[in-house]
Image (cartoon, helix red, strand yellow):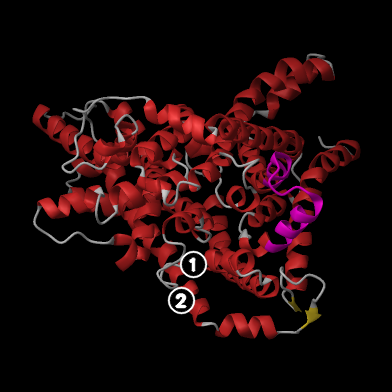
């Protein structure tokens, strides 16, 4: 029923969004690429000179860069494992008949709505502080040395904080998927004598596949650029122990005023995200069509 | 045939699930409780859960010392503003793609989503410099523009999945009955589209409220929303647990309550309709 006329109208309706997103993609990215070939310091404006690939070779050979890549991946993978395994277990539990399920769901989903800076500061000060934190108190009362989370295992501390924020999200999505599972199918399997483990592997897991894919996709987008949690807790330290790529580029640009170097780092981050994105988009394209 | 569940089993599941649920919720509960303590009680060991002298001093002090209300208004302006502008741009686009899909619609949607994949740090430097040179740094307008752009793909996707479920047969039926274009839009389409638009609005306000990359990098004192306001407690003021807790409670309470009402939409919206 779409006439030539209505198709033209359709294009006109889509155009503003496409143009805006295209400009948003192209203009700043083009500028970043341009800056990445310059020697450009914010404190010395007007002295920009063309340096070719010097920024890239400087950035890529910086030991901090390698650490940052590893940390970025550790955060993504660590949080994904915790949230998906934990999310499946929690969803299975919450799917059982119980009292007060509605209120419990509200409690479990709540951390997702807590802004990153609040989550990070509350955990850092009130829980992970080695002197007056609650975790230190628990350890001391059990007779252990209090653990200094942010000084001795900063990356683990950040993974815990971020996982706390995303576990509710994974749980809620997996629970929703679980509740759409056909009850008769489960009962039929039960009557055929399938035990709980068998039922989980052959009926529940395949049904959850699509939801797990979606959780991975969405969380990866956000986890690749974890920033606020690092900024307010460890500032990437001690040393570069908890610096990820996002934080490294930020530090290079706004703390060391090295626009060229930071731009080169930004481009590396874009390339890395694209590699991950290609895999993810293929995966989600497949599952969403099914 | 409902499965029979024994009473003991139901109680056992309830106890285990509630224990885990309370554990997950505990940091929020603890923050809330600490906000009513004095600074001394807040760091007291062993900590007291409920038996302390409840006080509202922290809330008063946070408001007086750092003008909480101004930051609150910044958050409201920026998150609501960016969502509404995003909706104005996105509704026609999602509408056209849902009702007049072409061969390229699917690719176009995927491309829009892929713009979300671009890491913010990749464009931080030029945006920062452009903002500095145009005076948009530390302004609510600048932040609203950025958040509109980063939210746009998600807004379009969410609206698209909602609009796609509106049956086109109804439109055709209305047309056959001789409904004018005006009547078609006002009496047929709008009532069916409003719930989807409302859900999108709700969810995006939540996402924008909690956005913490651009808000931290592009604001200072003037336009800082609550995310950046709380970040100023990172040190050494963060050691005043009671005040940190009061500020935190005020920063998360409004959106927490909104969030509780949006659970269903959250799942649909953030999974692009893949999980319902």
Instruction: Please give the residue where the numbered disc 1 appears in the rendered image.
Output: A244
Q: Position of residue B270 (x, y in %)?
A: 53, 43
Check disc 1 and report its element: helix, strand or loop: loop
Q: Position of residue A207 (x, y in %)?
A: 38, 48
Q: Position of residue A75 (x, y in %)?
A: 42, 63
Image quarter (top left, top right, bottom left or bottom right) of the N terminus of chain B: top left
Q: Residues within 10 Å of mark 2 (few under 14, many from 20)?
A: some
Alpha carbon of mark 1 to alpha carbon of mark 2: how far?
8 Å
Q: Is residue A233 left or right of residue A278?
A: left
Classify A134 as above or below B242.
below
Magenta stretch prevailing secondary structure: helix
Q: Residues within 10 Å of mark 1 (few under 14, many from 20)?
A: many
Q: Name the image quarter holding residue A255.
A: bottom right
Classify B8 as above or below A287.
above
Q: Residue at x 27, y 43 (%)?
A: A92
Does the magenta segment cover residue A9? Answer: no
Front-most of A162 and A147? Answer: A147
Q: Is residue A95 visible to us here?
A: no
Numbered mark located on residue B49 in the image:
none
**Marks 1 & 2 on one chain:** yes
Q: Residue at x 11, y 27 (%)?
A: B7
Q: Is residue B250 left or right of residue A6?
A: left
Q: Residue at x 77, y 20 (%)?
A: B185
Instruction: Please give the residue where the numbered disc 2 appears in the rendered image.
Output: A67
Q: Name the image quarter holding residue B152.
A: top right
Q: Residue at x 55, y 45 (%)?
A: B228
Q: Position of residue A98 (x, y in %)?
A: 22, 29
Magenta-tinted stretch: B125-146
Q: Give the letter of the chain under mark 1.
A: A
- First of labels 1, 2 by sequence position: 2
């Amino acid at each position: 029923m779409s006439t030539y006329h209505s198709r033209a109208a359709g294009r006109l309706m889509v155009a503003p969004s496409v143009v805006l997103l295209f400009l948003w993609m192209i203009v700043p990215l083009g500028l970043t690429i341009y800056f990445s070939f310059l020697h450009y310091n914010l404190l010395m404006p007007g002295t920009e000179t063309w340096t070719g690939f010097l920024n890239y070779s400087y950035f890529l050979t910086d030991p901090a860069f390698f650490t940052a890549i590893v940390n970025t991946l550790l955060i993504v993978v660590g949080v994904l494992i915790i949230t998906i395994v934990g999310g499946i277990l929690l969803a299975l539990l919450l799917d059982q008949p119980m009292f007060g399920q509605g209120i419990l769901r509200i409690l479990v989903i709540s951390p997702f709505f807590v802004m990153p800076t609040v989550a990070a500061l509350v955990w850092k000060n009130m829980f992970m502080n080695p002197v007056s934190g609650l975790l230190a108190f628990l350890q001391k009362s059990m007779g252990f040395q209090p653990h200094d989370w942010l000084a001795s295992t900063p990356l683990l501390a950040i993974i815990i904080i971020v996982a706390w924020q995303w576990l509710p999200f994974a749980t809620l999505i997996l629970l929703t998927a679980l509740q759409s599972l056909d009850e008769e199918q489960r009962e039929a399997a039960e009557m055929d004598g399938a035990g709980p483990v068998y039922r989980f592997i052959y009926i529940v897991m395949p049904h959850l596949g699509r939801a797990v894919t979606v959780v991975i996709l969405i969380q990866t987008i956000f986890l690749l650029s974890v920033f606020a949690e690092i900024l307010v807790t460890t500032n990437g330290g001690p040393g570069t122990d908890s610096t990820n790529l996002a934080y490294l580029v930020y530090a290079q640009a706004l703390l060391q005023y090295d626009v060229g170097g930071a731009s080169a780092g930004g481009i590396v981050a874009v390339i890395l995200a694209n590699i991950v994105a290609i895999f993810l988009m293929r995966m989600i394209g497949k599952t969403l069509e099914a | 045939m409902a499965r029979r569940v024994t009473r003991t089993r139901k109680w056992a599941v309830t106890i285990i699930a509630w224990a885990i649920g309370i554990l997950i919720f505990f940091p929020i509960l603890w923050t809330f409780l600490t906000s009513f303590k004095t600074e001394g009680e807040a760091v007291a060991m062993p900590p007291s859960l409920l038996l302390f002298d409840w006080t509202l001093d922290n809330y008063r002090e946070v408001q007086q010392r750092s003008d909480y209300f101004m930051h609150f208004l910044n958050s409201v302006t920026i998150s609501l503003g960016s969502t509404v502008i995003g909706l104005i741009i996105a509704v026609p686009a999602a509408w056209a793609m849902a009702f007049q899909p072409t061969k390229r619609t699917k690719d176009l949607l995927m491309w829009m989503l892929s713009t979300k994949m671009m890491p913010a740090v990749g464009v931080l430097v030029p945006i920062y410099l452009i903002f500095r040179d145009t005076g948009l740094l530390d302004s609510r307008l600048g932040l609203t523009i950025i958040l509109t752009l980063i939210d746009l793909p998600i807004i379009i996707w969410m609206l698209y999945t909602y609009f796609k479920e509106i049956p086109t047969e109804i439109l055709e039926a209305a047309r056959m009955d001789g409904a004018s274009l005006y009547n078609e839009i006002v009496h047929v389409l709008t009532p069916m589209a409003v719930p989807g638009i409302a859900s999108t609005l709700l969810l995006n306000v939540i996402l924008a409220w909690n956005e913490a990359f651009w808000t931290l990098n592009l604001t200072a004192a003037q336009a800082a929303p609550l995310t950046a306001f709380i970040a100023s407690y990172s040190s050494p003021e963060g050691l005043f647990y009671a005040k940190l807790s009061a500020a935190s409670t005020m920063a998360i309470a409004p959106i927490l309550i909104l969030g509780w009402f949006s659970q269903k939409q959250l799942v649909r919206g953030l999974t692009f309709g893949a999980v319902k």
